[in-house]
Amino acid sequence: MSTSSPFRILNIRLFIAFRVFFNARFYYPVFTILFLDYGLTIEQFSILNTVWAITIVCAEVPSGALADLLGRKRLLVLTSLLMIVELSVIAFVPITSMTIIFWAFLVNRVLSGLAEAMASGADEAIAYDSLIAEGNPAHWPRVLSVQMRAKAMAGVISTTLGAMVYDPSMVNGFLSLVGFDSDLSQQTTMRFPVYLTLVLALLAFWTTLRMREENEAAEPRPHVTLATIWQAGLITLKAGRWILQTPLALAVILFGMTYDHVLRLIITLTSQYFRQISLPDASFGAIMAALTLLGLVVPKLAEFMVDRFSPAQNCGWLALLTIVTLLGLTGFIPYLGIIPMAMVMVGLMLTAFFTSHYLNEITSSEQRATVLSFKGLAFNLAYGIIGLLFAWLIIYLRTDLSGVHPDWSSKLLENQAFKDSFLWMPGYFLVLGAAIALY
């Protein structure tokens, strides 16, 4: 095995670049309020993100099997094209009627889900196989660490700039400073983070075109036919059977799912949460950029933990971190509420690192993308379910509050229902975690 740097391998560098371009989205610091400022409601926001998760669930494992059979590069190129289309839909949708806007966001969520499913597993598989062929697979934690830190640095830039260009006063002030007299409205500037992310989609497309698969020239991939679809189904069944018969793989997926879907739901609600802890909208980008800097530290912590502790011990540490975080979020402490939100990001990063490390370590090359897709399937199925549960919970709490406080405005009812919903999360996590542990 080679002891030289894994970053001399082209696919490793392209893997890191693709992860940066695909994930550094300028609209993330204003994700929730972007939907709301387009005119959608918080329930529609939850339902649309559940559609996104369901789309991933339906496409996740088949896309992984097709990646193993037809080629990971093909799936990644298609992923980038879908990203371009999904962003174009909401970047250029006219604000003429709520029906058109809702359908545009629905198309966006479906295409985004398909892109996410096709990327899941395929990019890791092509990189890990290149590391086996040209380097040392023991260096994979280093690759993950650098990849997460690169994403963190890109996240600092994208979240800061995204929040700034979303704010019309910021944009108008900058244009005035450079000599342009403008009066752009929120209806105009709310699209700017989407435009910038569309540029990253084009860069992601260019990156995937440069990737090379091992034995690509020697073993041409088959075309999509009924026979290859049938073969992909057999690969899927084989990988599923292997997961069920491999206790560590099953445990990694189930426990990772438990942490991921709860913490990811909270991350999607970040901008609304910040409003409830008295933070001004203009500060969201700077705060998210500061929190993203955790990505420079957490990967090194994760490297230490996988070397120092067993998978079971790391699972226990992550469970403790998650429950403390969920309890801290329920307080909605003005300004200081940033601290538990930072812990949410730490928990998500550790979950991503641990699941990738342990699954890649024990999975064979011929079914790697499919197994990683099963992981994505479990994670996104859980996320879709909790998204629906959250939407129903908000409706229930708001209806209950309106009966107790008939004089409250709809905005006050929505805000209080949002706060009350967080009281349910620690109990939900404990019950689900205990059920999986007993299983």
Image (tube, helix red, strand yellow):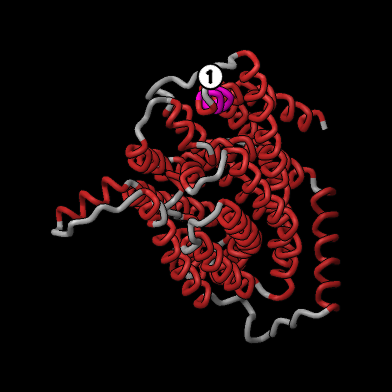
Name the foreground residue: 303 vs 25.
25
Instruction: Give me the residue at 49% from left, 38% from top.
Output: 345
Tell me residue 360's x, y (percent).
Answer: 65, 55
Left or right of 355, for residue 146: left
Of all residues, the one furthest to the top in this rendering is 404
Q: Does residue 359 belong to the magenta stretch?
A: no
Residue 231 falls in image quadrant? bottom right
Tell me residue 76's x, y (percent).
Answer: 59, 69
Instruction: Give me the residue at 63% from left, 13% from top.
Output: 404
Residue 256 falls in image quadrant? top right
Q: Is residue 324 visible?
A: no
Q: Quick one: label 1, few (<14), some, or many (20+) residues within 10 Å? A: few
Tell me residue 93's x, y (percent).
Answer: 50, 61
Quadrant of the image containing the C terminus? top right
Whether residue 7 is situated above or below residue 296 in the rendered picture: below
Q: What stretch is highlighted in magenta?
A: 412-418
Instruction: Give me the residue at 71% from left, 58% from top.
Output: 60
Magenta stretch secondary structure, dominant: helix
Q: Mark 1 highlights which residue?
A: 408
Name the foreground residue: 124 vs 1.
124
Left or right of 146, for residue 330: right
Which type of secondary structure does the marked residue at label 1 adopt? loop
Q: Which amino acid does label 1 sit on?
A: Trp
Tell me residue 101's x, y (percent).
Answer: 56, 55
Instruction: Give me the residue at 68% from left, 37% from top.
Output: 386
Q: Is residue 38 visible?
A: yes
Q: Does residue 416 belong to the magenta stretch?
A: yes
Left or right of 413, for residue 369: right
Name the foreground residue: 180 vs 287.
180
